Every structure is written in C-alpha cells, then in structure tokens.
Image: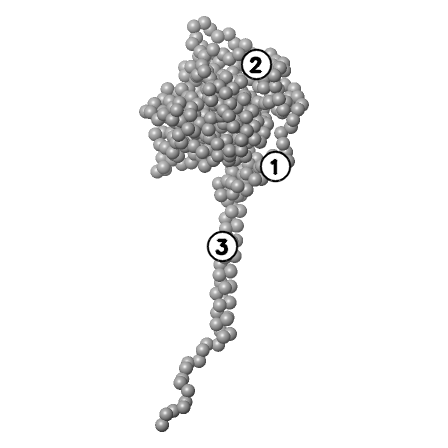
Amino acid sequence: MESRRPVYRPPAPPAARRHRKSVYIRRRVIVGIVLAFFLFVIYLGISLGFALSNQGLGASYSARAAEWGRTNGMGWAVTWVETEWYKLNPAPKGGKPQSGAFKTNPDRIKIPKGVVHTPWPKRMVSPVGSWLPGEGVWQPVGRLTAKGVPAVLVTHVRVDKVHTSQVAGIAWMDSTLLKAQLYSGSFIPGPLPGGKKYQFSAPVTPANSKTMVAAFNAGFRIQDANGGYYTQGVTVKPLRKGAASIVVYRDGVMTVAKWGRDAFMTNQVVSVRQNLDLIVDHSKAVPGLDSTNSLKWGKVLGGSFNVWRSGFGVTKTGAYVYVGGPALSISSLANLLVLAGAVRGMELDINTDWVQYAYYQGAAGKAINGGNGTNLLSQMSYSPSRFFSTWMNRDFYVMQLVK
C-alpha cells in the first residue's frame, strides 16, 4: 500500500537566529571601520604634532601645518586655504616704504688696480620710475677676497608701481670671484637611493664656512617643481627638457638655463636643480606670466598672487642676481630680474618661510657661523644661522670665494 506520509525535510533554522547572525557581522564590520578610523585620526594627530615641533618645516606653526598637509596628500586643501587667506589679506597698495628701507650713504670700497673682477652694475632702475633717496644704489657687503675686493653687492627697490610701500632686496654676485655649491636636504629633494648620503648638506661645516660669502634658498618641493634634480652623479628625479634650471659645473661656475637648449648633461655638470619654466629669457619677461597656467608657473598659488617670492638670474657679463621680497606676483618678480640685468631668470621658492638670502662677514680663511650673517631683508623669517642648523632639511645654495 502506498504511504501517504509526507516526505521528511529537516527543519529550517529559526529566522531569528539568522537575523542575529547577520546583525552580529554588521556590527563587527562597523566596529572595525570605526576603530580603523580612530587609529588613523590618532596617527594623523601624532604626525601633525611632530610636524608642528619641526623647525625645518617652517618658522611658524601655520607653515609647518601647511607642509605637513602637503606631505600627507592634502595639498589641495592647503592651497585652497592659502588662496582664500590671500584673497582676504591682499598685499597693501600705495604708501611709502618704512624709514631706513634704503641706505642713503652706502659704503665705498676702492678696488686695487690689476684685480680681475666682473664690472659692477649701474644703479638699478626703480620699477616705480623715479628713485627715492638711496633706492637702487648698490652697496658692497659680505666678506672680502684676500685682496680686499667685495664679491657681493646688494640694493633695495620698491616692488612695483602698485605696492609702493613694499621693498624687495636684490643681490648681485661676481662670478669671477665666487664658486657655487648646491646643498641638498633630507626633505627636499629627499634621500638619495640606496641610503647614500649627500656630500653637501646642512649644516655648513666650519671648514666650508672659511670661504663662505652668502647662502640662499633653492626652489619648490620636488613634487611641485615640474622638474628634476641631479647631484653627485645621481638623478634624484628625471630632468625635464625645457625646464628652468640652475646648473653648477665642476669649476663652481653656475648658470640659469632652459634645459636642452642652453645646457646639457656633460661630465662637467655637478648639479642641476629645476623649477618650473623660465620667467626671463633674452633679457625680457616671457609672455603669458599673467595667465592661470598653474603647471607652468607653479600649481602652489600660481603666479598672480602678490606674495613673498624669490628668483635667480644670470646677466650678460656672467654675474648672478638674486631677487627676494614681499608682495610680488610672478610678473613683478620677472620685471625685477630684468631690471637687475638678467638675460635668463627663473622663480625659486615662495612664501615667507622659504624666501631667504643671507651674506656673511669675516676675514677670509677664518671659520664663521650664523652670528656673522645678515639677511638681505630684515623681515625674512629665519636668521642667517638657519644654514648652519642640523634641522635645515631643504636644499639651498652656498657661494664661496674662489681665492
């Protein structure tokens, strides 16, 4: 007889038990995500704390926080904050420079006959037009050669016709009396491959200070410079054809070049530091400096904001000129380089904490330190001791007497 008993099927697990299991899994996932988030926040907090105590990241806490943000992938946020700040706090327009901005009675040094040196430049034309007393007059500074010849001259001029209370400093350096050396940093450009150490890095040693006359900042962080970096026979970052480049040769001579046109890699090249594109070429400001091409003129703030900027150029006589100061757009920086005699020029670093030129006194052949130094502008954030400090982790240039 056929059985009518239903086929046996094992009972399904209670719905409530399945629901409790899925809720348990979701809670574990949520707890894991929250825990990971808090650990990440704690890590960022500790990292930021170390950054705020690091003098090498800036003189001010705001500068250190900005460097920390850019290093940790928040450069877009830092740039936005800086942009908004400069919109709300634009450079002052009009007015007159502070008393004492220009030295009306510069020192005079008579050069002995028969000494080979680069002819000194004529009084620098003011961007405003007519001179104020002492404006644009060159003054010899820094230690002298063994024959008593100055290798560095400085002057000061107003930055442009609009921001007439703001003053830029200009240094002129004699290439026949000086040799250049690039000092590399652990932060800029970063460590050499294989843990190899830089031969020249901060602090400047007593031995190297014996002929030191001046030191000044280099360019942007490597990731922002749109260019490469070469030193000690190592390409730290590939060189870009067409990039503005400071090239130093084995004999200590340096130049500003459009890479691949004015300079090429040879066995005489000891360092190449690239930063953006030339802003002065053939003794003129290049076209398009007022455009918003952030890649060409620097994605960090671009070129239109009037902020602290620095630049470097080479003249037709082979002399070097450094320009640094507040309230400078990239156009006004280029104009100052042209007025200082540059046939080719480039922008270096920007913002208050990173623009610095210092010159040093002392008898030739004697070791010096930061106490022997004077800043090109008194408003520069760091003291001249910066280049003698172990925490200095950015690259910079040192100018030394040839003899």
Q: Secondary structure at mark 2?
A: loop
Q: Residue flagged by tag 3: what amino acid is it? A: Ala
Q: Position of residue 105 (x, y in %)?
A: 60, 12
Q: Which residue is mark 3?
A: 36
- Residue 71 sits above or below residue 126 on the image: below
Q: Nearer the viewer, mark 2 or mark 3?
A: 2
Q: Residue furthest right?
A: 95
Give the residue displayed 51% in from the left and 23% down from the top: 285
Q: Quadrant of residue 304?
A: top right
Q: 210 or 185: which is nearer to us?
A: 185
Q: CA distance from mark 2 to mark 1?
A: 35 Å
Circle 2 residues within 10 Å: few <14, some 14–19, many ≥20: many
Vertical comparison of 5 with 237: above or below: below
Residue that sits furthest to the top in the current view: 113
Q: Nearer the viewer, residue 20 or 368?
A: 20
Residue at image x 61%, y 16%?
129
Query: Does any portion of residue 388 appear in the rendered image?
Result: no
For numbered disc 3, what is the local secondary structure?
A: helix
Residue 393: x %, y % from top left: 46, 33
